[in-house]
Image (cartoon, coloured by chain):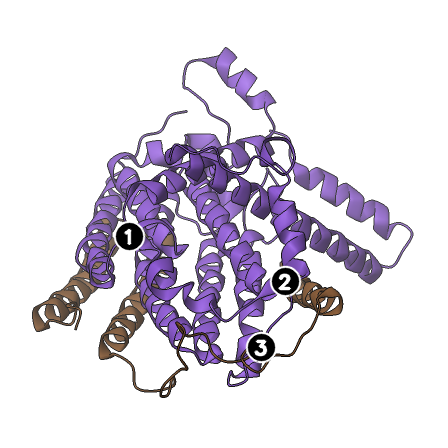
Amino acid sequence: MFDLQTWTTAIHTWLTGFIPEWTAILLESVVVALIIITLYAVFAIALIYLERKICAFFQCRIGPNRVGKWGLLQVFGDVFKMLQKEIIRMRKSDRFLHDLAPYLVVTASMLTFACLPWNKGGHIIDFNIGIFFMLAVSSIGVVGILLAGLGSNSKYPMIGAMRAGAQLISYEISIGLTMLTMVALTGTMQISEIVQQQADYGWNIVRGHLPALIAFLVYLIAGNAECNRGPFDLPEGESELTAGYHTEYSGMHFGYYYLAEYLNLFIAAGIASTIFLGGWAPLHIAGLDGFNHIMDLIPGFFWFVGKTFFVVFLLMWERWTFPRLRIDHILSLEWKYLMPISLINLLLMALVVVLGLGINLN
Amino acid sequence: MNFTLFVTVIVTGLAFVGFVLVLANLIAPRSFNAQKDEAFECGIPTRGQTWMQFRVGYYLFAILFLLFDVETMFLFPWAVVMRSLGPAGLLSALFFLFILILGLAYAWRKGALRWQ
């Protein structure tokens, strides 16, 4: 596989050849920042367009088709419209908390976004406690959502934020446990290492057979809940709460919640493709060497993005198929079904690992 | 390098939000209206306080979350070295998990998982 690390190291040595090291690092940081913002914006826009089109096809509609060819420019139009709208602040709201909330939500999702492995050596943040770090920073978003409801000092956002808080923290346990299951299989928390192992021994979902498959299904359900989507979208249920925790936000203030929501969808799918479906690791079938060589020619970036969009499609399918649940149903689904299942699944995985039952494909 | 990038990403996130909000504030029109900065309500003026005592069900689940999230945190180091610890490590962790499952069963039995 092509290793991006060789390029970044080469650029770093070339830069330090004629400027001091701190300037080089500063310059590289600026480049990294620009790359993150570009990717963040591009994927958010792509996902919003995709969601509208897919939702439309699920409901036998056409979807956006006026602005640009096949409605491709619709999202750009929306962004510019939002940029021109006045940012309204409530008289009775807590100004500081109300303004702080979008910063927390966007920064949390950006930090998680930076952990995704785009290619071999193509990750931005790669701590040796990667998975743990990911779980930690992604839960900062909950604080942002609760602050949005609390700071608005209005009834609907408050109810929405409370519901969102209860739902997000509940499903975080399932997410944590399924990730824990996969960490038990791979024996490392470093994300690049996890993907490298999958490139060597086969994708985790095959390698860990039954427990990995159960973990993947639990992750798909909990991932949708964690993004406030699908059958779990009652924090912003339009028909009862108008918009939930971001009712009092207008213009670009609201736009950030919208952006973060779709980026969280991408991140949830990206994590699923990293820990279950092999990240940038190409599809290999043991015994078919010619096929494996052809698959190796496709760059890792495309494998990662392709797998992620596949999971995104699964999550959208889930969203547009099931009707909205009630809060007690949501909480009992998590606490009485998903959590005991993932606890037992963890034990199963522990047995598989300790007794050495995992499948080795290569 | 990782920590530099960590700080870079945080600064990027904050700057991204801040910059666009400043831009929006510059180009967006402003108008004054007595009703505009009132809290949103379905047609009638808002009554009563928003910052008040809230339904207890949410807090019950928050306490349970704290318990089980800390549990997951403790299990992560074990999961990493599970392979090298072998059956002995599995037995010790089983004991830990058993106590926690007992805790969940207790909460379930007491009705803490029922929405009220």
Task: Have a look at marks 1 and 2 and say if they share a chain.
Answer: no
Q: Can residue B81 be seen at all in this image of the molecule?
A: no
Q: Position of residue A214 (x, y in %)?
A: 26, 41
Distance between the alpha carbons at the discs numbered 1 and 2 = 32 Å
Looking at the image, is mark 2 or mark 3 nearer the viewer?
3
- For disc 3, the chain is A
Q: Position of residue B24 (x, y in %)?
A: 70, 65
What residue sits right under mark 3 in the picture? A89
Task: Have a look at marks 2 and 3 and say if they share a chain.
Answer: no
B81 or A254: which is nearer to us? A254
What residue sits right under mark 1 in the picture? A324
Q: Which chain is brown?
A: B
Disc nearer the start of the sequence (3/1)? 3
In which quarter of the view is residue B43 placed?
bottom left
Q: Assess disc 3: are there few (<14), some (14-19) or many (≥20) residues with their C-alpha within 10 Å of its C-alpha.
A: some
- For disc 2, the chain is B
Is residue A132 left or right of B33 when viewed as pictured?
left
Q: Which chain is purple?
A: A
Looking at the image, is mark 1 or mark 2 nearer the viewer?
1
Looking at the image, is mark 3 or mark 1 nearer the viewer?
3
Q: Which mark is residue B13?
A: 2
Is residue B10 left or right of B62 when viewed as pictured?
right
Q: Position of residue A245 (x, y in %)?
A: 43, 68
Q: Residue at x 57, y 59 (%)?
A: A255
